Amino acid sequence: MKARITKDTAIAVVLLWLCGTSLRLPILAVPPLLPLIRADLHLSATAVGVLISLPVALFSLAALPGSLFIARLGTKRTLVGGLLIVALGAALRGASPGTAALFAATTLMGFGVAIMQPAMPASVRQWLPTRVGFGTAIYSNGLMMGQLFPTLITLPLLLPWLNGNWRWSLAMWSLPVALTAAVVIALAPRPARAPGEQLAGSGTSAGPAKWWPDWSNSLVWRLGILSGSVNAAYFAANAFLPVYLADTARPDLVGKAVMALNFGQLPASFLLLIFAGRLERRAWPYIAGGFIELISLIGMVYGAGGWAPLWAALFSFATGSGLILGLSLPPLLSAPGDVARTSAAMFAVGYGGAVVVALISGAAWDLLGNPRSAFVPIGLCAIVLTLSAVGMRRRRELL
């Protein structure tokens, strides 16, 4: 007998998807515009790495405050606050007169996304307590679509409509995020709970909800390393592949390659809506994903000309699968009351590693003078992903 889909369930699904898109819309508006931004502001390759890594750095640094806000203010208020901060930061980027202002606005925007990150698993737990896996797949699908929309729209439609102005193109992506905040305020369902479960941020008679991660638990670090290897590879590839193609006399492939880097994750997200239950806690998808990432990365850098977008799509499929499956691990491997703080710890460790990889890639390019050297750290991330999955399988955290 099929479970009846209630009004609150339908609203929760829509809101999770919209919030998922808001996690990436303003951030992924940058890669298609990087050649214009770099030329206008005279950015070095290291500065490009900094620009891309700033939001990722905030994902790490502000993940734990996000857990604190959830415990003290509640999940809905934290989620709405994060959305409004993202919208403000994205709009201010468009008003940036120079590099410092652009970096400052990007930092603000990254802070908003960072406090939203642990709020998403907590929202899934509150709004769909008996369908956590499906809820995670829904907001992950929104996240993937949020990565795809800017690549589909920015260069062919938005930039020409705005007379080639990259600042206005960045600012426009603040509008859907602000609208999402308004919809959450108006329509968010009341928190539900599974039998015997405490809601994040609700507290108990014994004391307030926990927010500080249990750093003595080695699982937190293993989740962070696994998550970080996927995120680092994805963000660094988005940062350096467009500039690499432009600098190697293939600017005609920039739009196609950036689109492929994000479009390739979309089939993965739809497939996992169907098969996520069968792949939960399985080690082999991560092992296979790391191998595919490494092969496709070599293809992007050394492949013959026009094949770069196809290799980028394969790379994107592998990273997208790893990202979605990784997001499901905190709810699967931690106690219900620990989901937000375990997720926050995973984001803090994982995105911190992603920042380091992006900076190392940019520095390698500048110091060695060889564009291909920027992709060596990305390849190492693929190897780390495979080794992490093997290690977690030996501990029976993955099967």
Image (cartoon, rainbow, N blue to C red):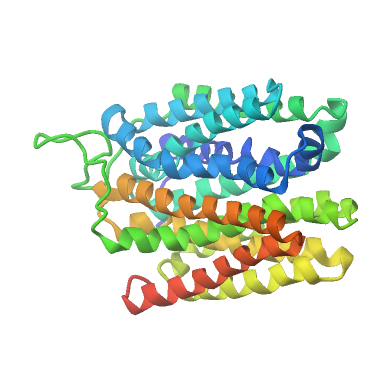
Relative vertical location of residue 62 with respect to residue 82 in this rendering, above or below: below
Does any portion of residue 171 appear in the rendered image?
Answer: yes
Between 352 and 282, the one nearer to me in the picture: 352
Give the x, y percent position of residue 353: 48, 55
Give the x, y percent position of residue 255: 82, 48
Drawn side of residue 256 relative to residue 274, left or right: right
Query: Residue 304: which quarter of the image?
Result: bottom right
Residue furthest to the front in view is 367
Drawn side of residue 81 relative to residue 296, left or right: left
Identify the residue shown where x is 45% and y is 23%.
185
Relative vertical location of residue 297 with respect to residue 149 in this rendering, above or below: below
Number of marks drawn: 0
Give the x, y percent position of residue 313: 72, 61
Relative vertical location of residue 63 with respect to residue 389 in this rendering, above or below: above
Between 306 and 192, the one nearer to me in the picture: 306
Identify the residue shown where x is 40% and y is 68%.
281
Does any portion of residue 271 appear in the rendered image?
Answer: no
Give the x, y percent position of residue 223: 39, 60
Query: Residue 123: which quarter of the image?
Result: top left
